[in-house]
Image (tube, rainbow, N blue to C red):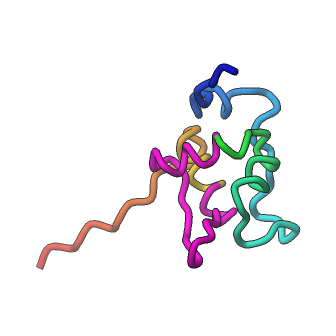
Amino acid sequence: MTHNPPKPLGAILSHPSGPSVNAGSSLYPLAVDAHTLGQMLGLHKNTIEQYRKDGVLPFVNFGRAVRYPVHQVMAALDRMAGLTEPETEPEPSPA
């Protein structure tokens, strides 16, 4: 059995079928596990876990359970795809 490395996130974001989740919709839970997020994005759960380990996707720990905040994940994917500006801290005003 050969192990295929995860697809580069850019390839997923530019693929016609990939991610089409409306994170603004109230139909989605606040946070999901890797399997559910993988189904939402059309990725294998191992790919989701690898992206977490690589620091690509935001996540939270609830004890031993790892959950992915759906709105934060979608915002991160939008930023990586260049659909939104990166979040920046406002510049302090000169005194």
Q: How many marks?
A: 0
Instruction: Please give the name of the residue rendered at 80% of the width and 44% of the height, measured from the top-left corner.
Output: 20
The one of 76 and 55 positioned closer to us in this rendering: 55
Residue 14, above or below 52? above
Spot occupied by residue 36 in the image (x, y as percentages of width and height): 79, 56
Q: Give me the residue at 65% from left, 20% from top.
A: 2
Q: Give residue 41's position: percent from left, percent from top.
A: 76, 44
Q: Quadrant of the N terminus?
A: top right
- Whether the magenta-drawn stretch holds residue 93 is answered as no
- Residue at the front extreme, as displayed: 1
Instruction: Look at the picture and state if 58 lies above or below 78.
Output: below
**Residue, far top:** 2
Q: Residue at x 46, y 52 (%)?
A: 86
Quarter of the rendering containing residue 72: bottom right
Residue lying farthest right?
27
Q: Against 94, is 8 above or below? A: above
Q: Quadrant of residue 68?
A: bottom right
Residue 71 rendering spot, x and y as whole percentages: 67, 64
User: In the rendered view of the protein, which quadrant contains the C terminus?
Assistant: bottom left
Q: Describe residue 43's horizontal placement relative to residue 58 as left or right.
A: right
Which image quadrant for residue 37?
A: bottom right
Q: Is 70 on the left-hand or right-hand side of 54?
A: right
Question: Is 58 placed left or right of 1 in the picture?
Answer: left
**Which of 3/69 is in front?**
3
The residue nearer to you, when weighing 13 against 93, is 13
Q: Is residue 92 left or right of residue 1?
A: left
Q: What range is drawn magenta here? A: 47-73
Residue at (60, 31) in percent of width and height: 6
Residue 73 x %, y %: 62, 56
